[in-house]
Amino acid sequence: MIEPYVTFNEKNNVGYIEFFHPSHNAMPSNVLKQLEQTFVNAENSDVKVLVLKSGGDRTFCAGASFNELIKIEDEATGKAFFSGFANVINAMRKSSKIIIGRVQGKAVGGGVGLAAATDYCLATQYASIKLSELSIGIGPFVIEPAVTRKIGVSNMSEMTLNAETFYSAEWARSKEFFVDVFKTTEDLDVAVKNLAEKLASYNPEALKEMKRVIWQNTTHWDDLLSKRAEISGKLVLSKFTKETLQRFKQS
């Protein structure tokens, strides 16, 4: 079995950040911390553009690690757990570099949040998305600001309340979550490479200023996402959620 990893590779002034976990790219806290730090470290690199991608050919990201979730026994641990995706989203938001999302497969929960936090997201036809948190008694509180910013309150609410429904990549494209959808991963990779290298040839100062414009009015997110992580950290201890998690564990 391939071990979890986060890598950073530079090519033609583009930095490729790739994460992987053998459990459908479900992200435990330590891998999320590595991913956050990789975005922070990328600020000191010479690359002009970043690409966020995941390993494997089926699932982009299945969200937070379920195995870690069921072990939470106190509010402090719960908040720390849900702060994982919050910290990555904030690192992406604060990055001075344009971030392109490359989504080759399904995204669930926190994985939807990662895709939403990119500045320009491309996907394959297999990249359906789902916000499943309410079905286990929590809610997509941490990632909601990023998702709502991308597709609006109405669409975010629809996905959240239909918590067991996968929404197709074409639906996501129609709501401007994805900019474009491709038939194959190979076509996706060509499009990502061409776009990233084209952007990397532009004036870097203009790209930085554009990044600031894209993320204007979000300077309060450090505090906001921390508070949202606290909400989820409490809810994960509720009787409903504990019982639901046990059923999942037994199945």
Image: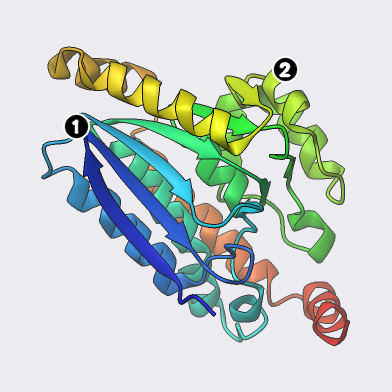
Q: Of residues 88 and 157, which is closer to you in this image?
A: 88
Query: What whole-number distance in Å separates the C-alpha atoms at marks 1 and 2?
Result: 31 Å
Occupied quadrant, residue 200? top left
Q: Which residue is mark 1?
A: 13
> The residue tagged with tag 2: helix, strand or loop?
helix
**Image coords of residue 38 (percent x, y):** 27, 55
**Image coords of residue 86 (percent x, y):** 45, 53
Please name the residue shown 23% across and 50% down the image.
40
Query: Upstream in the sequence, badge 1 or badge 2?
Result: 1
The relative height of residue 180 versus residue 160 in the rendered view (above or below) is above
> The residue tagged with tag 1: helix, strand or loop?
loop
Can see residue 215?
no
Left or right position of 13 against 113? left
Pointer 1: residues within 10 angstroms few (<14), some, or many (20+)?
some
User: Mark 2 belongs to which amino acid?
Assistant: Ser
User: Mark 1 belongs to which amino acid?
Assistant: Asn
Please name the residue shown 37% across and 45% down the image.
90
**Total numbered labels:** 2
**Image coords of residue 128 (percent x, y):** 74, 40
The C terminus appears in which quarter of the rendering? bottom right
